[in-house]
Amino acid sequence: MTPILVLLAGALSLCRCAREESAAPGPREAVARAEHASPDEHGPPRAEHGSHDEHGPPLAELVAAAESGDVEAQVALGRLYLRGSALLPADVGQARAWFLRAEAGRPGSAAYELGRMSQSGKGGPADPVEAVRWFELAVHAGSADAMFLLANAARSGTGLPRDEARAVALYQRAAAMEHPEALQALALAHLHGELGLAIDESESRRYMAAAGHALQHHHR
């Protein structure tokens, strides 16, 4: 790898780690103070009236929106349960239930989260085939993150037959949406002549530069 690409790849790795650690999907912390979960452990959490923080709406407001059928609120609540906090303990069963409820409205973000849960084995045994099924639904809904993960699966043959051409096509679709990791994957594939792509350092540098730009855009 040429020196400039080594530096770019290292910078992208550091920025990506920072983005993953500092910016979880959905509300950062949807509540500053919350009471304990509902006495019925299968029900939604309760919060003090109006409790909130600077990053998100009051939890009671979020729950009310989710229960009224707002799919974005349902996904946000599912993510809140999945992440958990000292004030709202993680509950993968509730997270999955809210994602499934949201997925009925076909938002790509819900199918993507369900795919990630199936892939990592949260709430049950890891199931790569089920993960692929969810990712395909999310891709159909336009999720660039799902395109990237489905491309990885096609590249490795995890949960579906190995298909490098499909992996490239998915990376390219996600790259067109400025997905940093997809851009970096294409840059490295051109650098090393992987996935059936010809070695092309100029094309590799172009994709790596675009990945750096995309990361800066995501940080705004």
Image (cartoon, rainbow, N blue to C red):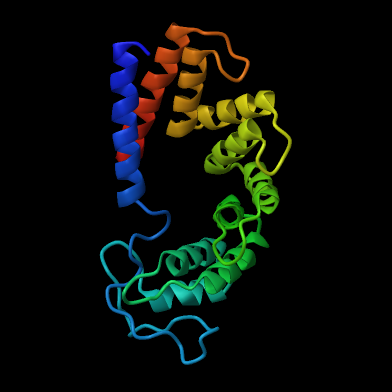
Give the left or right position of residue 118, taking residue 60 as reference.
Answer: right
The front one of 1 and 166 is: 1
Residue 110 is at least partly visible in this image: yes
Q: Position of residue 93 (x, y in %)?
A: 56, 73
Identified at 29% across, 36% down, the residue is: 14
Q: Position of residue 124 (x, y in %)?
A: 60, 65
Residue 179 is at least partly visible in this image: no
In the rendered image, the quadrant that contains the N terminus is top left
Whether residue 10 is situated above or below residue 196 in the rendered picture: below
In the rendered image, the quadrant that contains the C terminus is top left
Whether residue 184 is situated above or below residue 22 in the rendered picture: above
Give the left or right position of residue 155, taking residue 5 as reference.
Answer: right
Identified at 68% across, 62% down, the residue is: 104
The front one of 39 and 107 is: 39
Residue reaching furthest to the right: 161
Q: Position of residue 175 (x, y in %)?
A: 51, 28
Identified at 62% across, 61% down, the residue is: 125
Give the left or right position of residue 139, taking residue 64 as reference.
Answer: right
Quarter location, residue 214:
top left
Identified at 43% across, 7% down, the residue is: 202
Quarter location, residue 106:
bottom right
Whether residue 138 is situated above or below residue 206 in the rendered picture: below
